[in-house]
Image: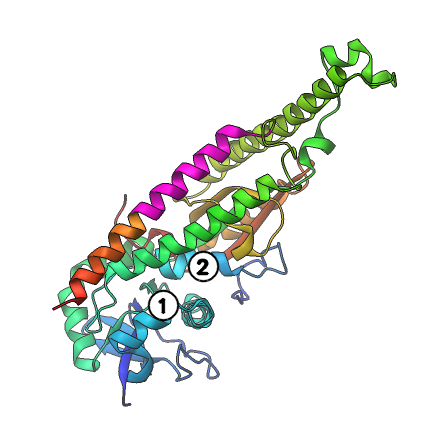
């Protein structure tokens, strides 16, 4: 991202926004208008959910790995993991429901 | 121009010219479509990629999505340097100019109100990360375990080993808790220096490509004139706490504040 010269330079990773910064704004924020070409909100929601599922899975794998919490799952933060697992399950259910809905919508 | 019309943003008319090199999502330069008191920023996009079916298929493709999102953001970013754009969500496509004009007319009142609310303001993103080693570097052994002697170098029994492990877990958790408290204080302070704020879901390390756990992901609406001060405030928190990283992004168009208030 380039910065307007009259505003101060941000610091961070070279002042650059990462992909997640851009996707969360461009896909998830901004004004929603139904154009002539309908990618309906269902598709956007599907997409957002899929991105979130990636997020949850990676976090979970990371927690079970070596890098942040204790190696032993019994000693690590069970609450946080359960929360992620629950959220993951909910998102999968929602995904299944949406995909069913879309299939029905497409069939004549 | 031929093809479909991809709309990036709606603005009030502005004088400054867009960068001449600027290209949009399908490589065509964005154009300004004036209609009554509003301007739609549009570019021509081919049917083969942006008609309903191909667009839907493309949305499943993270590489395509990434390139398109970056191009979309590039146009919004260029607009932000010269005016206050109202950014539309990715993939807002019309058949032709008259479709865009009809949309401008139908939403005129909303657009004008929102543009007035956001005029002269930008969005700053602030994220707080806990570095992986935060718990270890920020904490020192303490409490009853030390008194019991394992820390003094005695041979470890199985019980001591378990106790030590549990102690380490406590230290990690205490590190995370401290980070969350820090993030909460930071957010309160920054919100007090902003006109409005939004808390977003923490980001995945895979998408962001950054290290550490993201404990705060917030957006702040700040007048341009006060942006320098806001950036300095964020800057001063750098290095305030070991193991904590504060990241600032922006200035963004007011994406997080473009919709109606939640």
Image location of residue B57, percent across then percent down: 33, 72
The quadrant in which residue B26 appears is: bottom left
How much space separates mark 2 and mark 1, taking CA atoms? 23 Å
At horizontal 64% and vertical 23% (from top left) the residue drawn is: B170
The range drawn in magenta is A76-93
Q: What residue is disc 2 on?
A: B252
Q: Secondary structure at mark 1?
A: helix
Mark 2 vs 1, N-terminal side: 1
Magenta stretch containing residue A90, yes or no? Answer: yes
Farthest-out residue, bottom:
B1
Q: Residues within 10 Å of mark 1 (few under 14, many from 20)?
A: some
Q: Quadrant of residue A64?
A: top right
Residue B148 in the image: x percent, y percent? 79, 9
Magenta-drawn stretch, dominant element (helix, strand or loop): helix
Queried whether the magenta region covers residue A78, the answer comes back as yes
Q: Disc 2: which chain?
A: B
Res A48 label: none
Q: Quadrant of the C terminus of chain A?
A: bottom left
How many numbered tags mark residues here? 2
Dividing the picture into quadrants, the one containing residue A70 is top right
Within 10 Å of disc 2 (Cα), the crowding (few <14, some 14-19, many 20+) is: many
Q: Which chain does the residue under circle 1 lie in?
A: B
The structure residue drawn at horizontal position 66% and vertical position 22%, both measured from the top left corner, is B166
Q: Residue shown at 55%/55% (left/top)? A: B206
Whole-percent x and y of residue B60? 38, 66
Q: Which residue is mark 1?
A: B59
Tell if the residue under mark 2 belongs to the same chain as the one under mark 1.
yes
């Amino acid at each position: 991202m380039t910065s307007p010269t009259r505003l101060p330079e941000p610091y961070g990773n070279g002042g650059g926004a990462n992909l997640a910064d851009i996707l969360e704004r461009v896909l998830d924020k901004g004004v929603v208008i139904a154009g002539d070409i309908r990618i309906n909100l269902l598709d956007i929601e599907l997409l957002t959910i899929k991105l979130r599922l990636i997020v949850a899975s990676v976090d979970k794998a990371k927690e079970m790995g070596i890098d942040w919490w204790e190696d032993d799952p019994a000693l690590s933060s069970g609450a946080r993991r359960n929360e992620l697992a629950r959220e993951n399950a909910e998102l999968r259910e929602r995904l299944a429901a949406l995909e069913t809905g879309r299939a029905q919508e497409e069939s004549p | 121009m031929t093809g479909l019309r991809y709309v990036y943003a709606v603005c009030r008319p502005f004088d400054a010219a867009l960068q001449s090199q600027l290209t949009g999502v399908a490589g065509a330069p964005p154009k300004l479509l004036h209609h009554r008191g509003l301007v739609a920023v549009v570019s021509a996009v081919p049917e083969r990629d942006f008609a309903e079916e191909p667009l839907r298929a493309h949305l499943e493709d993270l590489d395509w999505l990434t390139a398109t999102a970056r191009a979309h953001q590039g146009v919004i970013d260029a607009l932000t340097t010269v005016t206050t754009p109202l950014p539309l969500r990715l993939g807002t496509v019309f058949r032709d100019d008259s479709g865009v004009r009809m949309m401008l007319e139908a939403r005129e009142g909303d657009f004008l109100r929102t543009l007035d609310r956001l005029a002269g303001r930008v969005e700053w993103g602030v994220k707080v990360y806990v570095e992986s080693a935060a718990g270890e570097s920020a904490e020192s052994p303490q409490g009853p375990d030390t008194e019991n002697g394992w820390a003094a170098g005695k041979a470890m029994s199985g019980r001591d080993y378990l106790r030590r492990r549990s102690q380490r877990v406590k230290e990690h958790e205490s590190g995370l808790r401290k980070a969350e408290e820090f993030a909460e204080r930071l957010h309160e302070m920054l919100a007090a220096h902003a006109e409005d704020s939004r808390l977003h879901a923490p980001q995945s390390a895979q998408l962001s490509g950054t290290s550490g756990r993201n404990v705060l992901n917030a957006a702040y609406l700040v007048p341009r004139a006060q942006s320098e001060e806001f950036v300095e405030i964020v800057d001063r928190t750098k290095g305030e706490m070991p193991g904590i990283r504060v990241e600032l992004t922006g200035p963004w168009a007011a994406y997080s504040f473009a919709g109606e208030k939640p």
